[in-house]
Image: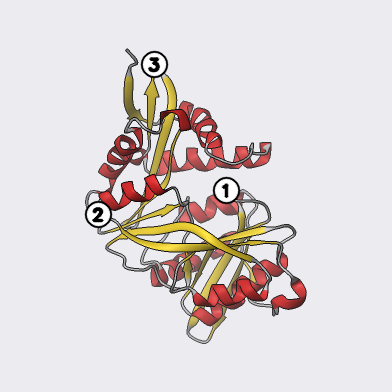
Amino acid sequence: MASVSITPMEPDDVDDAVSVFETGWTRELSPPVRERLAVSLAHLVRATPEGSHVARIDEHVVGFATADVADGLWLLSALFVRPEHQQGGLGRALLSAAFESARGTGRRLILTSGNPRATRLYASFGFTVHPAMAATGRPNLETLGAVACGREVGPDDVGELDAIDARVRGAVRSHHIALLLSQGARGLIAHDGPQAGYVLLRDGAPPVDGVPLLLVASDDALAAALLRQALALAERPVTIDPLTANRQWAYRVAVDAGLRLMPAGAVCEQGIGQPASGWITSPLFG
């Protein structure tokens, strides 16, 4: 009889976790993307070790979950189980283990990719589900209507980005921003009177990069201007998600850019309500 166990994720488990992730993705990850994902998972394990677990069958890693707690906001960053083991309750067991790290937090967030079993699982844990769309494709610069916006973000700006996050997200994530900047992410920070916002971006394909990586603004007009500028800097097709119903400004930008719109899972939350309209939530970093 197979031996099944759920144990805390250790640094040595990260490569196995990336392999599990790859089985649920539609194509093989390129070496640079695979490396960035491994670095990001290792970072999450260090940041919130009590939120990261692996599922083993006969000592082989067949699933994993990582959850992050930062400034009172709990985020399920990833939950993956190999397809051949998805009917045995491992997803629920991993979520239960990761959810232990949510004790004492009043605000909790999960982003789903559209897997109906996963969405049902999160709803069964009491999460409110907000359906979302994605915008994908290569931006049409002739119709995008981008206008120069803001200035480049540097390492010394992390404190200012924290202030914007605290205002809009209700939680800071400076350790995550520092990681992304160290991985080569570019950023723009902008002010419009009392309003402020920023976007971090890297050209490429989802899920561990893409445009934007993070976008937060205290005003919808400023958020739209930052997104237009980010798309103008994109050098290849992009994906923007999740776009919930209260992010109509992002839909208008996507239409102007000639991007395709399609269903893209949901934002699941407890204690948040719909996340602020100027906050495009990030799967790994909230």
Residue 58 circle label: 3
First of labels 3, 2 by sequence position: 3
**Where, quadrant-wise, is the C terminus in this rendering?**
bottom left
Front-lying residue, 152 or 76 = 76
Looking at the picture, how far across and down is residue 30, in whole percent? 68, 39
Specify whether 206 is left or right of 71.
right
Q: Which residue is drawn at the image coordinates 27% and 40% (left, top)?
A: 96
Q: Nearer the viewer, mark 2 or mark 1?
A: 2
Q: Read off the residue under disc 1.
A: 208
First of labels 2, 1 by sequence position: 2
Q: Which residue is drawn at the image coordinates 38% and 46% (left, top)?
A: 118
Label 2 crowd bin: few (<14), some (14–19), many (20+), radius 10 Å: few
Q: Amino acid at mark 2?
A: Gly
As measured in the structure, the alpha-carbon distance from the residue carrying label 2 to the one carrying label 1 is: 27 Å
CB atoms at circles 1 and 3 under 8 Å apart? no
Specify whether 28 is left or right of 245.
right
Q: Secondary structure at mark 1?
A: loop
Front-lying residue, 233 or 270 = 270
Q: Amino acid at mark 1?
A: Val
Q: Secondary structure at mark 2?
A: loop
Residue 126 circle label: 2
Specify whether 203 is left or right of 4.
right
Q: Nearer the viewer, mark 1 or mark 3?
A: 3
Q: Secondary structure at mark 3?
A: loop
Q: Which residue is drawn at the image coordinates 65% and 77% (left, top)?
A: 149
As measured in the structure, the alpha-carbon distance from the residue carrying label 3 to the one carrying label 2 is: 32 Å
Residue 82 circle label: none
